[in-house]
Amino acid sequence: MHSPLKQDHHKVSTTVTQDTSAYTVGRGAQFNTKNRFIKNEITRENIESIDDWEIRNLKTQYIEQQSKTIVNKIESQDAGMGYSMNPYAGCEHGCIYCYARNVHEYWGYSAGIDFEQKILIKKNAPQLLRKFLDDPKWLCAPIMLSGNTDCYQPAEQKYRLTRSLLEVCNEYNQPVGILTKNSWILKDKDILQDMARKNIVSAMVSITSFNEDLRRAMEPRTTTALQKLKVIEELSKAGVRMGVMMGPMIPGLNEHEMQRIMEAAADHGATFTAYTFLRLNGSVQLLFHDWLYTNFPNYADKVWHLIEQSHGGKVNDSRWGVRMRGEGNLAELVAQQYKKYGKLYNMNAEEWSLDTSRFRRPGSQGKLF
């Protein structure tokens, strides 16, 4: 299958090229990488060297479990919030660049196909959150929904765990920040609107590209960019503070779209922004490399070298404050554009924060603090 990839503002013309006889459409990863915690396992990390490998059934599996905790303290100094909760582990969206793929190895699975296919369902997530908030040691602070995997991925349509978590948060007046790239969030507009009146919720929609060929290849089971703009507009009109996440910016593929994304998001009601610069940590490096050279064989070398140039000669960087922004001329140019267009479209102009003063445990009397 050959489909033109429109590259606005780019001098180089590229194409998305997928051999449908070997390429599994609808999945980002095409194989399972080795789990670094398992010594003996069968993996397929060099596709060309194995001719008779049989592809397993790629139907999504929902694996229900009873978890021990739901709220996690975020140790990363690059995160905007100190706590997160994820009702699902693994993500069917299949974004090839997702850093959360590596976390799936802790569960005994691969960061590759397993991450998209084997979705862990934390069935008791609402009960765990209620128990967590009832603990007198909890001094209210905002919690991020989707710190790792998308809380509105397809599994939410069946289990509605995100909805239940929001209901608990609304009951306790617990402030929440949401990050998603799925329009299913609109199903919760009623409760989000109620929480917005109390200033205990904000939401960001992730837009990576307006190029549908690129979007379908890079994050195959996400909502289209135009639909994401509609999400921003509808929730913004409902009173929810909306923002746009531009990430990751990938040199040579989508970094030139930053201005267009910010302008469109602002036109649809977004008032704040954030962005990340691509880094390929752990197994994601192997998966992204295979994806890049499969889909962009004539352009892959240039993109790969641009990524290396933006991380001191490597494609990964673990240094706080640098790893999510990159370094070098191209990364600096992206940072300058972010500042320039943020001012132009009046993004991040106001001092604003979620309200923690309203937090109450049901049945408590008077002010908590």
Image: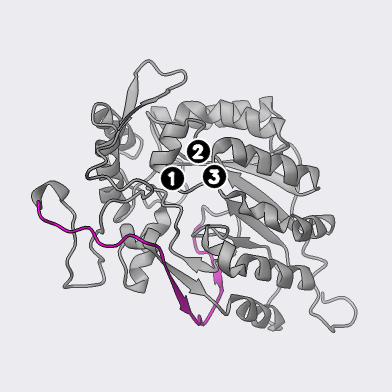
Element at badge 1? loop
Q: Are marks 3 and 1 in contact (CB under 8 Å)?
A: no
Q: In which quarter of the image is residue 175?
A: bottom right
Separation of residues labelled 1 and 2 (CA atoms): 9 Å
The residue indicated by pointer 1 is 219
Separation of residues labelled 3 and 2 (CA atoms): 11 Å
Q: Main secondary structure of the magenta part?
A: loop
Q: Position of residue 130 (x, y in %)?
A: 68, 79
Q: Quadrant of residue 296?
A: top left
Q: What residue type is labelled 1?
A: Glu
Q: Nearer the viewer, residue 191 or 84?
A: 191
Q: Position of residue 96 (x, y in %)?
A: 37, 48
Name which residue lies at 38% across and 40% down.
217
Q: Which amino acid does label 2 sit on?
A: Thr
Quarter the C terminus occupies: bottom right
Instruction: Looking at the image, tell me whether mark 3 or mark 2 is earlier in sequence order.
Output: 2
Q: Are marks 1 and 2 in contact (CB under 8 Å)?
A: yes
Element at badge 3? loop
Query: What is the crowding at mark 1: few (fewer than 14 residues within 10 Å), some, or many (at least 20)?
Result: many
The residue indicated by pointer 2 is 208
The residue indicated by pointer 3 is 223
